[in-house]
Image: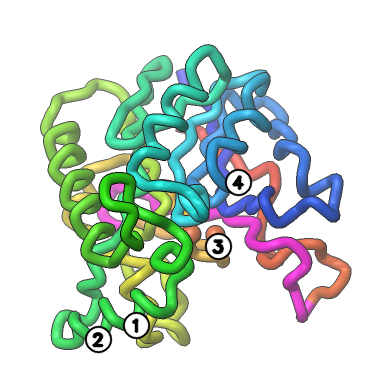
Amino acid sequence: MAMKIQIASDLHHEMSQHCHELACPLPLAPGADALVLAGDIHEGTNAIDIYSDYPVPVVYVHGNHEPLNNRYPALISDLEDRAVGTAVRFLQNDQFTFGEIRFLGACMWTDYLQFPLHFNDSLEIARHGMIEHKLVRRSGDGRMFQPEDARMHQRETLLWLREQLDVPFLGKTIVVTHHIPSPRSIPHAHQQHALAPAYASNLELLVERADLWIHGHAHWSCDYRIGKCRVICNPRGRPGRNRKYPELPYENAEFQPALTVDV
Ligand SMILES: [Fe+2]
Ligand SMILES: [Fe+2]
């Protein structure tokens, strides 16, 4: 039986204190059986508190904003502990089977390899340009979380993901990540942006093995196919940042609060 899956990301509740509507949990879409939140929902473990009593399961991966002002990867255990007994299924290299659907989830991070000839430049530009490398400390030695750390975490995730995709599954497979699995999710005008490698990796061979891949991190919408796999991003973006539509209280004018797909 088909399930209706509601999709959103980058709600950035942590920036929404001034706006009651944006600080509240995203309303459940009519008929939705589960809500997927693909990261950048709130800092620390706060997203779990906001969605703890949600009426349907909330499949949640953390983004690069959850660890800000925290220790990483220690935050992962905090998120896992906090989610116990709530509606939230927090996934970091972990899966959740729901009826005939398996969700495979992880933040995923990135490999900074989108421009292979400029790999070292990409690392340095991300080191100085991405907030997670300024406001996140590593759990062990307390040093700043660096692009090299993000790469290591991505390697772990991809190893796990390949193993999972090798396991036969009769139902549908939905992969949920915060980071972007294909440069196709980046609009043409931004594809050569120096920070693009901090957003997207080229994982198309992996993508086409899933039925649906939901990601966040971009603050623009996309919906396209790689092989049989549909790739969807439905981010709300930061509050109060839409210059083109000043009446809109958030960044992405294409955000659909009640977007669902039948799987
Ligand atoms: Fe975001
Ligand atoms: Fe992000």
Q: Tell me if residue 38 comes above or below residue 243 in the rendering.
A: above
* Cβ–Cβ under 8 Å for marks 2 and 1: yes
Mark closest to the chain's N terminus, 1 or 3: 1
Q: Nearer the viewer, residue 148 or 174?
A: 148
Q: Which mark is residue 121?
A: 2
Q: Residue, x 25% and y 71% (percent of image)?
A: 112
Magenta stretch: give its range. 226-244
Q: Residue, x 88% and y 68% (percent of image)?
A: 247
Determine which residue is flagged by label 3: 221
Mark closest to the chain's N terminus, 3 or 4: 4
State the CA–CA distance, disc 2 to disc 1. Answer: 6 Å
Image x and y of residue 199, in percent: 38, 67
Image x and y of residue 185, in percent: 41, 67
State the CA–CA distance, disc 4 to disc 2. Answer: 30 Å
Q: Identify the image quadrant of the C terminus.
A: top left
Determine which residue is flagged by label 4: 42
Give the amino acid type for the residue marked by disc 4 in the picture.
His
Mark 4 neighbour class, 10 Å CA radius: few under 14, some 14 to 19, many 20 or more: many
Q: Residue, x 45% and y 56% (percent of image)?
A: 64
Q: Which mark is residue 125?
A: 1
Residue 165 found in image quarter: top left
Q: Magenta includes 81? A: no
* Cβ–Cβ under 8 Å for marks 4 and 1: no
State the CA–CA distance, disc 4 to disc 1. Answer: 25 Å
Q: Disc 3 or disc 4, which is closer to the eye? A: 4
Residue 241 found in image quarter: bottom right
Mark closest to the chain's N terminus, 4 or 2: 4
Give the amino acid type for the residue marked by disc 3 in the picture.
Ser
Q: Disc 2 or disc 3, which is closer to the eye? A: 2
Q: Residue, x 24% and y 50% (percent of image)?
A: 153
